[in-house]
Amino acid sequence: MQCELNSSIEQESTAQDNGSQLAMLRRLPDVIAEYDEKKAALPDAVAAFEAAGSAVKLAACVGGTWGETSIETGSVYESRLAESLLKSAWRHIYRGLRIDSIASAADKRRFDQAMTTPAPFTLENIRATFGDFLLNPRANILRGLAEVFCDLDQAYKSHDKVKIGVVGLPKRVIISGCSSSCGWGQDKLRDVLNALAAYQRKPLTTYQELTALFKTENALLVEWKATDHQGTEMTYPARGVRLRRFSNGNGHLFFEPDALRDINMALAEYYGDVLADCTEEKPTERRAGTEVSKDLQYYPTPAAVVERVLGDVYIRQGERVLEPSCGCGRFLDALRQAGADAVGVEVDPGRAAMARSKGHRVMLANFLETVPTGDYDHVVMNPPFYGKHYAKHVNHALKFLKPGGKLTAILPVTARYDHGLLDGRWSDLPVGSFSESGTNINTTVLAMWAAA
């Protein structure tokens, strides 16, 4: 990433800005140097403005005598100029690197929110903000598509339903707020079309296209041309979608076969063609229910997920908490900080040793072969995701709870939407929550309580 951002941007980058083209063929250090130079010159710019205002007023008087006519020359403030300069520098890089062509709808909103109080304009901050987009553009495109489609229909969250060539992806989705070509419905529709366009390497959707789609159901099925407000003839690509609007304000967005295939391919690529939590299509010989081979699958729980999950557990000082399949002890770390009396179980000696080295109490064992005790206040777990194997872990863990005790488990979303093996209170985690652990599996959190 440092090589990418410290070297010049060799190819010309362009971005749309109200119909005009903004060309950028500059080294990032040169952009930073311009910013620093202009920031240092702001006091002189303010002084020059004030001097010019004084000169205008002097031009309207003789011998310094006021002519009793108010002459307003306006005012500028260095702090406001510095704020505008900083935002301009960040947006110049954002547009010049064409981040909008690969960023997800959520990423774009995060960037706009960050522009309320932008970070200092330094190479390090530019690298931290945009480096991943430059190094992994396709990964960001795929994540953006997954985010927007998972919000539309639970079928897009199901890994069983998005394997390449699988039959079952919905051919249409329902978008509310489509009573007029402005507002929430239009924004959501734009996000969907832009996510698909980024994957298909087509231009981002324009306001003209959205307006046409709201007027005519089939407007985007074929390529078409139109003249914009400046008299320039524009060519708009076929999008492969139809929008049917209804009197209740809902819009049904239909996908043509090619578009649906691209959605299928993109989601399958993002999740992985071989998915750890998909049902085995050709099971091999039957094995013991406590086999450990599937248990060795390991996705460490990211810190953000640990914080989110424990935020809903409400552990009191001294309560006993069990973490099955505790790995290197990421939940145990947070549980200790919360004042819990926590114990872990781990089948892998190396990971158990890592957790013990941090002072945690960890039993080295296959959790499914441990004897239930029925004396824990809570169970917090991130069991193996493979197939339906997780259900054995959850059902066994319930036996460790005292009456009224609570179990909280991170599971693949197929547990909620496809398998139907467990019942409780569900809460889906954001798309890509486990990306830093090496998997894009969609995940959900299940809460269950032992009978009182």
Image (spheres, rainbow, N blue to C red):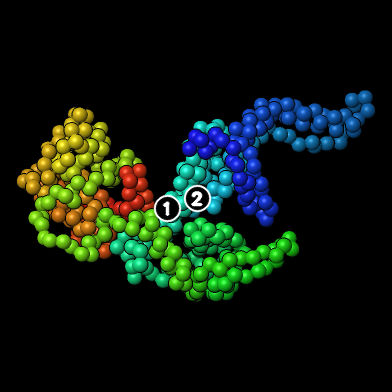
Q: Is residue 9 above or below residue 64?
A: below
Residue at the disc numbered 2: 103
Looking at the image, which residue sits at the far top?
63
Q: Work out whether residue 239 can be spotted.
A: yes
Secondary structure beneath dot 2 equals loop
**Which of the two residues, 312 or 105, is positioned nearer the viewer here?**
105
**Which of the two residues, 372 or 378, is positioned nearer the viewer here?**
372
Residue 412 x, y percent position in the rendering: 27, 55
Q: Amino acid at mark 1?
A: Arg
Q: Amino acid at mark 2?
A: Ala
The residue drawn where x is 47% and y is 72% is: 256
The residue drawn where x is 51% and y is 69% is: 240
Residue 43 x, y percent position in the rendering: 70, 26
Residue 203 x, y percent position in the rendering: 57, 59
Decide: few, some or many residues near mark 1? Use Cα within 10 Å; few <14, some 14-19, many ≥20: many
Residue at the disc numbered 1: 143
The residue drawn where x is 93% and y is 28% is: 62
